[in-house]
Structure formats: structure tokens, C-alpha cells
Amino acid sequence: MKEKIISGKDKLKAWVKRLNTKRDLNTEKYKKTNICILLLFPFFICSMAEINQGKYLSSYFTFLYERPSVMLFNVIIAALIFCLLLAIIKKGWIAVLIESVVYMALSTTELFKYGTNGNHLILSDMKLVRSVKSLTSFAYIKITPRLIIYFIIVIAYIGLVFYFNPKFRLRPIKRIATSVACVVPCVALVISPTFSEPIYSLFNLDTTAATNAFILNEKFENNSFLAFIVETATESFENRLVEPDDYSEESVDTIMDVDVDEDEDFNGGVKPNVIVIMSESYADFRVFDELDVDDSYYEGFDNAVAEGCGGTTITPTYASWTVRSEFELLFGLPVRSLNDPNMPQRELAEREQPALAQYYNSWGYETVYIHPFTGSFYSREKVYSQFGFDQLIFHTDDENTDFTVPVEYYGTYVDDSTVYNQIEQLINETDDPLYIHTTTMQNHQPYDQGDDPDDEFGNYLQWIQHTNEGLTAFLDDLEEIDEPTLVFMVGDHFPSLRGDTSVYNQLGINGDNCSVLYEQKYLLWSNYDADFSSVPEESVSFFYMPYVIMNIIDAPRDEFIQKMNDYMETIPIYSTNYDCTVPRDDELDMLTYDRVIGDVLSPCPIPEETLSDSEED
């Protein structure tokens, strides 16, 4: 047996040696063939990436016919990348392999992403690559025969190049020059508007400013996959956050020169528990009359509003990027002032942050953040530990959980009622008043579970009804608790629904009429005689809601809180996605920069020595 194994290894080695000898001969014998397959490759891989993400050959040929200049742009970019790889690696098959893997991986990600939530892939999405395990639990991933065939074609091309073995033979100085010649225009496209604008115009790329998700998707239809990624990378670089030109202590002091009403005393000293529930993907589809959604799905929410107070707030995101909404509720600041990053927590300075939990701490509250999902997703556990919370509660799985109540599931994720039970336990076991922020998970996609796996929207409504039933039970329990408690509940955004077959497409939602998808109904409820007279009657942006809550509980104000209340009256809506016609406000933008990135020159509840220590670290 041992002799047979040795003999098998020798045969394999001999075969590999013969193959490599043949490949070395092919390098010299088929020079013209090698030149052809290398020259053809950029067009080939662009075509396969476009076909793969578009699924059908017909859509690819339509794209070629209607947008030939965009396809030419794609091929030129692919050729520059390919030449760079050849200059660095020299071996043609390895360069082909690397670029093929990247292009097909991106196109497959785009295919699944759009099929899952109706949003297209942009390069900033790659920041979540470390959370790929969590992302796959959200996505509708289906390996089809068509997808397999496309990959087989690409693998066959790689095999062809491997066999003919073309090589890029240049002297080191010429390889360096080639690399520079390839890198410079690619980098200039992203960082230099002077260079990119005429290039995009020459190839007829759509450079419309994407002020909401639907306009962004319409840009994709015009540019298709590859050009879309490049152009949005340019747009993202142009929108990067920079320090305001006149940022200084004097400028901030001028902004903070306001008269503060110092009469607040928590309604005679009574500090109620404050429970903020940001409900995952919770949205009221009754705003669309044509859907004829039955009121029974929202009965619990409606009853709570009838007992307390309700209104409409403008969320900064749609279908995804929960952390945008979460940032605005946790900081009371607009993501627009940060130029609308998908993940604003990645923009923050590495130090103790003046999030609103810090205020509640200074007022004698116990502060808790609850999220029934892994703490590593969006780096919440690391980043939110600097927000002033006394306790962070996450749930990765049944063996890795911070929950101290039994964890139940509804569908894929933790039941909202489990979160409500955790909140009740904290109230019962904590002597100090509580400030709790929870971001739930129950209603996160996928919506392929329910009475009919194919009825995504129907299943979503079933999940919403379950949330409302749990909410009713939760509020009933709070009625029996002998502690004044204020509850604020709002959805973070309308849900992610499948691309071409989604209810949004059926409704004909586009970049011009999508504003309703940024309007979220909220409720304010209390088990005591709370004064809701200060709640604004008109819609206001998400980031103002923490100050609405502070006004209800009659919390103390410093110059910062007073200034934000003033803004709520003068600029009630400050959201690019909802209304980009509202002009930028330099003061509000500077104040936001100061608090989360700058030197925190504005008043904040963090002791100066603590803030100084964290900055040094």
C-alpha cells in the first residue's frame, strides 16, 4: 500500500512537471494567442460581472445597446487594474485569477444584496466584511444553476490562461512606470473632481447627487454595476467629513450664546424611568391606501397612542443602516451634519462621547443599552461603551448572552417580548431611575417565515402584529409597576423588502415620491400623568425626539440642550433623504462636528478631566 501511495505521488509530480513544461513552451509558442486572451480579458470579466449581477443575458445586451459608452468606461477601468496586476505579478494567469475573483465576488454580493433589500452595493458596504456571518442571516441567498454556469465560464477562462501561460516581461523600471500609469488615473477618478467630472461626462455616466436611496437606485439603472461602484466611490470621497473652516472655541461660544430656562426640576423632583424603544423595521403601511392594510395589525400601537400621545418623525434612513437612526436618538444630532455616512459611529473620535446617556447619568439615572443581537455587529459593543451607559446587554446566541431573562425567538430573531421582559426586570431590580435605549431585532428581514413563505409582505405584517401584541402586554405590566415610567417607541426605518418584486415597486415608489418612506409614526406613553403639551404637532427630525422626551420629564437644560430646542423650532426637519432643499446650517453642522469629532468645546455633562483623559488615551 505504501509503495502504491509513493508511486501515486511520483506520477502526480511527473504529470505536474510535464504540464509546467508544456505551459512554458506555450508561453513562447503561442505569443499571439496569449496577447489575444490578455487583451480580451477586461471585456470578458466586465461582461461576466454585469451578466452575473443582472441574471439575464437579455438585460446585459440591452445595457450594451443603450449605454455603450458606460461599458467602454468599465472595460478601461478593468484594463487599468489588470495591467497593474500584470506589472506587479508578471504571471498572466494569477492576474486573471485575482481580478476574476474580485469582480465575481462583487457582482454576486450585488446580486444577493439587491435581491434581499432592494438597495445596490456601494464600496462603503465593504466596511461590514468582518460581520459577514451576521449579514448572511439577513440575506436571501439562493445558488441557482444560472449562477453556477456563470462561475464555470469564468473558471474555464482562468484555466485557459493558466494553460497558455502568458507572462508580462518588462524591466523593473518599466514595470514601475506601468504601475504608476495605472494607479494614478484610478486614484484621480476618486479624489479629484477636476479629473473625474470630464471623464464621467465623456463616458456619459450619471453623476446625479443621490439624496435618497431611490435616486441612488435610479443612478444604478443608468450606470449599471461597475461604473456605479466607481462613481459612488467618487461621490463618497467628495462627501467625506472635514473640519469646518472656522471651527474654534470662539465660534462655538458664539453658537452657545443662548438664554437658558433654568426652572426645570423634574416636575417637582420626580424622575421617571425613560424607556426608548427603537423597533427594528417597524413601519405603518396604512399610509398607502391602495394596500388596504387592516387596522388589526397595529391595534396595540394605536391603543397606546390613544392613551398617551403620538406624532410623526423623520428618519434619516430607509430599509437599512439602522445605526443612522440610532445615532440620532443616542446623540440628538443629525447625520446630515456628518454628510450622511451609512455608519456614523465610524466617524466618531476615539474618546468618551457626549451621547445623551451622559446627561441621564449626571441626573442620577442608571443607564442601559439593550440590543438582542451580537455586540460585534457595527462594532456596537466597542463603540457604545464610550457613550456613558452603565450597562450594555447583547445576545449573540443562547450560550453567549447578557440577558438575565429567558430568551424566546419569533422567527429568526429574539422576540420583542423578551426585550420587554428584560426592561421590566431592570425596573424591578434597580433603585435609581432608569434610562434605557433598546434597538430590537424581531422584525428584521428575512420575511420568508409565516403562513406563506412567498408572501413577504404578509409575513412582515404578521411580525408587526406580534410586536404590537407584546407592546400591549408590556404597557399593561408597566401600569402595575409603582414607578413613574415614560415610554417612547418608534421604528428605525421602513423594512427592507426584496428588489424587483417588493411592495415598493408595486406602489411605484421612486426618487420623487419616496418621502413618505422616511416618515415614521411614534408613540409616547406613560403610567403617570405626564404632560405632553410640549410635544410638537408638526413633524420633526429623528434627532429632536430626545429633547421632546427631556421636555416631557422636565429635565434640566444647559446651553446645548437649549440650543437644540431652539433649532427644533427654526429647523424642524434637517434630513437630506427627506428634503434636500432645506439649506445646510453651518452652526448646526459645526456643533455636531464639535461634539462627536472635535474637541467638545460646547457644554456637555462629561467631567472635563474624564474627557481629557480619554483624549490622551
Image (cartoon, grey):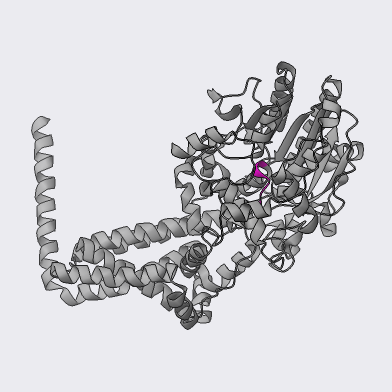
Residue at 19% across / 66% down in the picture?
A: 164
Q: Which of 371 and 330 is in front in this view?
A: 330
Residue 201 on the magenta span? no
Determine if residue 589 is in view: yes
In what quadrant of the picture does the C terminus appear? top left
Q: Which of 167 and 501 is in front in this view?
A: 167
Query: Going by the picture, which residue comes out furthest to the front?
Result: 250
Q: Does residue 203 appear left or right of residue 462 in this picture?
A: left
Q: Which of 30 and 425 is in front in this view?
A: 425
Residue at 61% across / 27% down in the picture?
A: 390
Residue 578, above or below 38: above
Q: Position of residue 405 (x, y in %)?
A: 66, 20
Q: Does residue 128 appear left or right of residue 460 in this picture?
A: left
In what quadrant of the picture does the N terminus appear? top left
Q: Where is residue 129 in the image (x, y as percent from the top left)?
A: 45, 47
Q: Nearer the viewer, residue 229 or 314?
A: 314
Q: Does residue 521 appear left or right of residue 58 in this picture?
A: right
Residue 331 on the magenta span? yes
Q: Position of residue 284 (x, y in %)?
A: 79, 49
Magenta highlight range? 330-334
